[in-house]
Every structure is written in C-alpha cells, then in structure tokens.
C-alpha cells in the first residue's frame, strides 16, 4: 500500500502538481520553493519524534481493532460477556474476505492507483494537457455542454477551458467531501463504545431511526435503515466538528483523527476467513507495493497529491514550528490495515484454541513492530521512500508460522475458519419447529425463529 516516506528526503518527488503547474509559468518562484524544500533538514530529535509517533499511532488501531473484532463475537445482545455495544446497522457488520477477493484485490488496487496517477501526474504534459487528456476532456466538455449540466465562465487569460473541469483542485474537492462523510461515520463508530462507558446514567436515552424505502405495498424495499440513539447522536456531532475542521483547514491532527478511525474500522470490520486467504492477500500486496514504489514513481506521486485522510502524518519540524509545522513524515493506512486484519485473524485463532495465552496475536504484533522499525531504518539509511509491506509481510507471516511449527500447531492454524464463528448479526435458528400443524403455522414459526435482526425495544424471543 502507500509507502512510508519522509518529505524532506526526496524534494523532487514531494512537490505537488500545483507546484509543477507553477513551474511552467514562473520558474523563479519555483526555484525559490524548491530551494526552501531542499534546505530543510530535520533534526535528530524531530526525526525520532515523528517516526516514533507514527509507529505509536499505527499500533493503536491494530491493537484495539483486533480486540474489537472478537470482543462481541460470542455475544448475542449488548451487555453480555462485557460487551457494551451491538451491531444494529448493516454498515457495522463485519465483511468477510475470501480467497477470490484476496486474489483480485491487488489488481483492483493497481488500476485505481494508476487511474489517480493519470489525473494527478500526467494531467499536464510540458505545460499543456497531453493528447490522451485533451481528447478525453474535450469529449467530456462537449457532452456536458450539450446536456447543459455544467457551465463555466472563463476570462480571456484562460489557456485551456477543457482542463478546468477535471483539474486537481476539483478532484481533491470532490474527494474531500466524500471522505468528509465517510470520516464522520467512521469516527462516530470508533467513539461509540467509549461514549457508552462515560455517558451519564441519569440522562434519558432516546431511540431514532433514519429510514428510506422504495416502492409501496409488497414491492417496498429498504434503501437506508439506520438506527441510532442519543449517545450515537452526540458522537455524530463531535465527529462533524472534526470533519468541518478538516475540510476548512486540512490540519494534520484532523487528518490523523480520521485516518485512525478508518484504520480501526478496517481492522475491526474486515475479516479474513482463514490464514491461507491472509497469505494470498499479503503476498499479492507485497508484489503490488514493491512494484509501484521501486518500479515507478506512481505511488509516491499519488500519496503526495491525494488530499484525503488515507495516510497518517506527523511533522518533523514540530519542535521548531509547533502545530503549524509543514514538513511531514507519513505512513499509508494500507500499511496498517492490511497487516492489521491478519493480526486480528490470529487473535481470533488464539481465542478458538481456548487457551489463556494469546501467543500468535502477540507474536504477530511484535513482528509488525519489527517490520515497521526495519522500514524506517532502511528509509533513513538510504534516503529513499520504502514500501512498508516489503518488510511487514515477511515479518507478520513468518514469525507466527515459525511459532506454529515449534508448537506443532501449523495444521490447526491453516485449517482454522474464522467464518465459522457465531457472530451477533448472523442469522441462526434458535429452536426447531415441529412438522405438526398447518403449512401456514410452520412458515410463521420458521420466519420468527430465523429473523436476522430485531429492534432494541422488542423483547427477546
């Protein structure tokens, strides 16, 4: 996934496309900007603080996301086995990744990454749009004009009207609004268990439901069915404040709050069905990460140009400039979530063994720390951006496999199926109807016993 990088180390690749556009119009200003970037050299204290903070932030969603992925696995309703929250909405339910999904994921990720690169890097070619973009953008512009869906006013100084529609600024604005909504929901879901613990008991809790349906009568189907209460509403308000702060200021703290929420939700809600699937996924993304970082400049370009909370950042000049620092070290969320879901799988395997120890979880967790530390060391030594999965994948897979070999549990590890666990949202039959009675009564009995979800205010069957 996105590489771990140091902004001050590779100034030629860290200049955003906005500066490249400036390159074509004002070389003197560009030279001054490049000189400013090149002059910055992080102090040893600033570098240690930045990378230590990145490692600490990366460990938080992995550790707590793995715990949350299994904390309610054996609870049917909230309040059992120490669980203080439940899955009420489909968006909160875990998604299982199969072997086929794992095999296709690197291909889909490569196509998406290269598509973003075409917009961000190849959009301007020697001061004007390339032939590919000119053809595509002209076609889109004529189509929009014919449909009268989009009108732009241009002054006489505009060089190329078709390029304005899909410029980097408009793409980043669209993506910012998209991640604004996703970030609010992710941060609200992250805060929900903590809000349940600290919410005053004397404040009444009201239930709400946001329901959108399509059709009528027997043809009616649900489009959106979101249930929430007073505590969830408070979480949404707090998350919205953070979202507005991010949209207006693009501050690195707001970016990290959203990034941590995305990473924790990914580790919690993305479940690998078995260890073999995890090996396929990590192996494929290992090749993907190495190719796009070492083979091309695509990964670095997109990571620097993509204005969205898809990476954790920490300033290396924090000690000199405080919260207004601008020279960042970064770590992509993919380097957290992908190993994180594999570590969470091993924690669920530990739980399935019904032992007091969590050997495989702690082994893979320490392996992640080792791999990430190795990434930072190599990057700092050779002064070049590094694909973190190059070091994380061998460590996170190799260490647990060696432990399983030593303990004689390798067969149990690879035969473990996480999808066989009983989750609170899984439809299941609580009692078996008898064959006696009419067909209508038999159907009613089957329907009532296999209902997948009930509202909170309904008494349990």
Image (tube, rainbow, N blue to C red):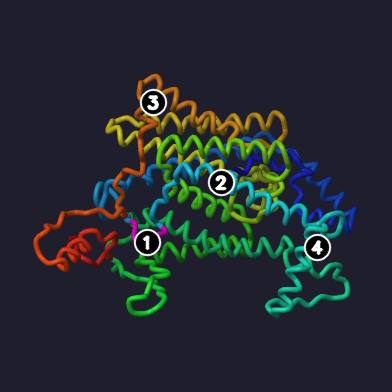
Magenta stretch, main secondary structure class: loop
| Circle 4 SS class | helix
Q: Residue at x 66, y 48 (%)?
A: 303
Q: Say above or below: 367 vs 253.
A: above
As measured in the structure, the alpha-carbon distance from the residue carrying label 1 to the one carrying label 3 is 37 Å
Image quadrant where one finds the N terminus: top right
Q: Which residue is mark 2?
A: 333
Q: Which residue is mark 3?
A: 410
Mark nearer the N terminus (4 vs 1): 1
- Write down the region rendered in magenta: 87-91
| Circle 3 SS class | helix
Q: Residue at x 62, y 39 (%)?
A: 289
As measured in the structure, the alpha-carbon distance from the residue carrying label 2 to the one carrying label 1 is 25 Å
**Front label number (2 vs 4):** 4
| Circle 1 SS class | loop
Question: Is residue 88 highlighted in magenta?
Answer: yes
Mark nearer the N terminus (2 vs 4): 4
Return the x and y of residue 139 as percentages of the image width and height.
76, 68
Return the x and y of residue 283 as percentages of the image width and height.
55, 35
Q: Residue at x 36, y 71 (%)?
A: 209
Q: Nearer the viewer, residue 265 or 48?
A: 265
Checking the image for residue 89, the label placed there is: 1
As measured in the structure, the alpha-carbon distance from the residue carrying label 3 to the one carrying label 2 is 30 Å
As measured in the structure, the alpha-carbon distance from the residue carrying label 4 to the one carrying label 1 is 45 Å
Checking the image for residue 290, the label placed there is: none
Whether label 2 touches label 4, CB < 8 Å = no
Q: Which residue is mark 4?
A: 134
């Amino acid at each position: 996934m996105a590489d771990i990088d140091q902004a001050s180390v590779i100034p030629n690749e860290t200049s955003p496309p906005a500066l490249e556009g400036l390159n074509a119009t004002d070389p003197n200003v560009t030279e001054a900007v490049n000189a400013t970037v090149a002059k910055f050299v992080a102090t040893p204290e600033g570098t240690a603080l930045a990378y230590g903070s990145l490692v600490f932030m990366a460990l938080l969603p992995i550790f707590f996301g793995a715990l949350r992925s299994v904390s309610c696995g054996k609870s049917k309703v909230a309040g059992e086995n120490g669980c203080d929250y439940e899955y009420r909405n489909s968006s909160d339910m875990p998604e299982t990744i199969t072997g086929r999904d794992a095999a296709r994921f690197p291909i889909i990720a490569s196509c998406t990454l290269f598509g973003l690169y075409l917009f961000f890097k190849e959009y301007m070619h020697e001061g004007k749009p390339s032939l590919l973009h000119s053809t595509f953008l002209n076609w889109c512009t004529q189509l929009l004009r014919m449909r009268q869906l989009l009108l732009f006013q241009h002054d006489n100084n505009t060089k190329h009207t078709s390029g304005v529609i899909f410029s980097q600024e408009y793409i980043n604005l669209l993506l910012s609004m998209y991640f604004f909504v996703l970030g609010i929901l992710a941060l609200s879901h992250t805060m929900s268990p903590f809000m349940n613990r600290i919410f005053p008991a004397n404040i009444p809790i009201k239930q709400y439901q946001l329901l959108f349906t399509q059709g009528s009568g027997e043809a009616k189907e649900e489009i959106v069915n979101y249930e929430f209460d007073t505590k969830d509403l408070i979480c949404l308000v707090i998350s919205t404040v953070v979202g507005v702060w991010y949209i207006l200021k693009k501050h690195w703290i707001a970016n990290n709050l959203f990034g941590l929420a995305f990473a924790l939700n990914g580790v919690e809600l993305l479940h690998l069905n078995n260890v073999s699937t995890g090996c396929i996924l990590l192996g494929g993304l290992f090749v993907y990460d190495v190719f796009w970082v070492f083979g091309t400049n695509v990964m670095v370009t997109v990571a620097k140009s993509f204005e969205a909370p898809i990476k954790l950042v920490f300033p290396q000049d924090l000690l000199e400039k405080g919260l207004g620092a601008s020279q960042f070290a970064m770590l992509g969320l993919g380097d957290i979530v992908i190993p994180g879901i594999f570590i969470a799988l091993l924690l669920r395997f530990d739980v399935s063994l019904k032992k007091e120890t969590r050997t495989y979880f702690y082994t893979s967790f320490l392996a992640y720390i080792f791999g990430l530390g190795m990434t930072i060391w190599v990057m700092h030594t050779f002064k070049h951006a590094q694909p973190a999965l190059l070091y994380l994948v061998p460590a996170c897979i190799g260490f647990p496999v060696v432990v399983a070999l030593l303990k004689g549990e390798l067969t149990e590890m690879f035969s473990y199926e996480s999808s066989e666990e009983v989750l609170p949202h899984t439809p299941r039959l609580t009692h078996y109807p008898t064959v006696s009675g009419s067909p209508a009564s038999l159907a009613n009995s089957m329907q009532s016993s296999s209902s997948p979800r009930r509202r909170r205010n309904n008494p349990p069957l």
